[in-house]
Image: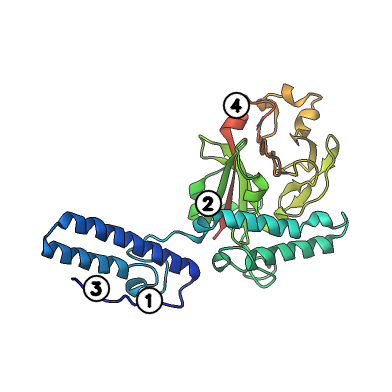
Amino acid sequence: MVITPKLSYNPDCSEDDTDQGIQCEEACYREYYDCRRKCIRDSACKRECATKKVRCENGCPCRINCFGGCPCDDYKCTSCQELHSTAQIVCVQKCHLDNNVNYCPYTNLTCMDAALDEYESCINTDCPCKAERKFYGCDSSLDMSGSSALAMMMSGINKAVIHRNMTEKTLQDNGFAKYFEIGAREPGPRLNDFLRSHPQTPELFIGCKHKLLNETLGIFISPKDLYLQTHFTYFDLSYARSNREYYVYYSDTYGEPFGFTEDQRIRLQGSDEFDCHNQGLPASKCAPEMMDDHRMTAATTMGSISLLRCGKNSKSNTQSFVANYETVGFYAL
């Protein structure tokens, strides 16, 4: 009988790391079991299997060679986001429902600010992965008045304007990570659930693209500026809210459409079709070459379709639009 030494264990490891340590040990035991079966009656082989088992277990989270928990050198840990993806979406959605700016009077910006602050506190306190979140507030990089102000330039890229050809590599090289991509028509959670599922961050990049192309039409925006929801009436000329050097809207009307444009004038009829309406044509009669390349519209709460327009292309003027286009989101690490 081979006696293996008792493993050292860190009792102060997080619950997630402890669970991953158990999963790691189970994997080590399965490898040990397979190894022993192949040994048959070879004692030296069995001793070697036992040695490998101890070495494997020692490399698990919260054990001797990874005492502090994930990440580990000898074991690939699963990120908190992957472990709790569904729970995080559900929790963030509940925070949104409990602290929705729609409950505030249309002109009461103080109420809206308070609701957004409560929402931020909720996702940071109650939702999974809060240890991975980053604090931001008046004294942080979002304070635009001091030397630590959030830079509007990123490796020569102006973060205050709409971008037509942003690439995932450029975003990753500058400290952004993708947290969702969802097709224009894709079963599952609504776009709103994905939009709000990011860890706490001072900056987002939200946009749209053709699935086969790497160039994204999108904007850099803070979560607070993104979630400021107001009312825009369908089929009426409206004026989007100024943000940085572009205009943005997030309406509380049917489908709760979100979008951006370089022209303050918008006309929602599903997607923003101001440019087409301004030519006296219905949306279905405006070919892509007749449309502005800077407008995006996505329905955030519809189950049947999310992305409605991406630049010159829309569900009204582009065949297979819903099959070929997607909305993407990145957050600053």
Q: Secondary structure at mark 2?
A: helix
Residue bearing the label numbered 2: 171
- Whether the residues at callouts 3 and 2 have beta carbons within 8 Å, the answer is no
Q: Left of 160 or right of it: where is 48?
A: left
CA distance separating discs 3 and 2 = 48 Å
Taking 179 as reference, is 192 left or right? right
Closer to the N terminus: mark 4 or mark 1?
Answer: 1
- The kind of residue on which mark 1 rests is Tyr
Element under disc 3? loop
Quadrant containing the N terminus is bottom left
Crowding at mark 4 (Cα within 10 Å: few <14, some 14-19, many 20+): few
First in residue order: circle 3 vs circle 2: 3
Is residue 149 in view from this perspective?
no
Mark carried by residue 320: 4
Q: Which mark is residue 9?
A: 1
- Residue at 83 percent across and 63 percent down: it is 111
- Pointer 1: residues within 10 angstroms few (<14), some, or many (20+)? some
Q: Residue at x 49, y 71 (%)?
A: 14
Q: Are marks 2 and 1 in contact (CB under 8 Å)?
A: no
Q: Which amino acid, mark 3?
A: Thr
Cα–Cα span, label 2 and label 1: 39 Å
Q: Nearer the viewer, mark 4 or mark 1?
A: 1
